[in-house]
Image (cartoon, rainbow, N blue to C red):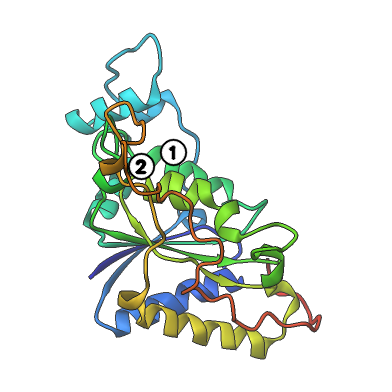
Amino acid sequence: MNVLLVHAHPEPHSFCAAMRDRAIATLEGAGHVVTVSDLYAMRFDPVAKAEDFHDRCDPGHLVYALEQRHAFETGTLAPDIAAEVEKLMAAELLLLSFPLWWFSVPAILKGWIDRVLLSGPFYGGRRFYDRGGLAGRRALCLIAAGSRAHMLAEGGIHGPLEGMLKHLLQGTLGYVGYAVLPPFVAWHVPYVDEATRGAMLDALDRYLQALDRLEPLPMPSLDRFDREMRPLPNADAIAGEPRAAARSSNRGLPAGGTRAKPSAR
């Protein structure tokens, strides 16, 4: 299996980087081919701009999605975007590795999403969710969080993590067609001891070894909607809300309760 791992953390010695390295070792050890885009190390430009397109279809007014389509069709994307698109199109599994910042992704990863998930080949018109351009492939987020697990669970102070990340899990990854696996989360990372961090990395090994047994998060199906995206009469309940607590995810990982010397966030 071809895997693309997109890593977004500014500190090379962070626990997030340790998860990246363990994921690479585990997947390659199982015979998979892993390509890595380390966004900070690459100095990836996250800013969507007119210069992303070398042959504009409308030089007078920038509609970014329309220019993406034109540039893809004419082979005139900026080279850094074209390189990432090529990696993405070759990958059967996409891994996003990042720290949870403000219940979201770092800005550099959001910029990668904006610039690389092109309108045209990956989505557009009625080509989204189960008809998206990346349908038939899988995506998984590897997340390092400062919070404790119970804070981002059903009934917790913040509510379920999957609800906080709906914009990413459904609105981005699911939207372009991926079967989105429950995220792997390392909890309370800056405040736990090395033994707990080691146990988290071992749990990541087991998680990645069980990929084929993980049930994807439910996503909407266009089969249940008419051409104007209204629910069809007598259609089943719309499957659009990611699981509240991802029953097959790693909610039970040791979160640690002792404050040790913080690792890099």
Q: Secondary structure at mark 2?
A: loop
Q: Secondary structure at mark 1?
A: helix
Which residue: 31% across, 36% down? Answer: 232
- Residue 107 visible in rendering: yes
Q: Tell me if 263 is positioned left or right of 226 in this view.
A: right
Which residue: 78% across, 79% down? Answer: 261
> Which residue is more in the foreground, 159 or 223?
223
> Which residue is more in the foreground, 219 or 115?
219
Q: Which residue is mark 1?
A: 114
Asked if disc 2 and disc 1 are in contact, CB closer than 8 Å, the reply is: yes
**Residue density around tag 2, few if under 14, some if 14–19, many if 20 or more, within 10 Å:** many
Quarter of the picture containing the C terminus is bottom right
Residue 49 at x, y = what percent? 45, 27
Question: Which of the 4 image quarters holds residue 122?
Answer: top left
Q: Tell me if 143 is positioned left or right of 3 in this view.
A: right
> Which residue is more in the foreground, 22 or 78?
22
Residue 111 at x, y = what percent? 49, 42
- Residue 43 visible in rendering: no
Q: Which residue is mark 2?
A: 117
Q: Is residue 65 above or below residue 44?
A: above
Question: Which of the 4 image quarters holds residue 244?
Answer: bottom right
Q: Is residue 84 above or below residue 180?
A: above
Q: Is residue 222 above or below residue 147?
A: above
Residue 61 at x, y = what percent? 40, 12
Which residue: 40% across, 65% down? Answer: 181
Which residue: 72% across, 65% down? Answer: 151
Q: Amino acid at mark 2?
A: Leu
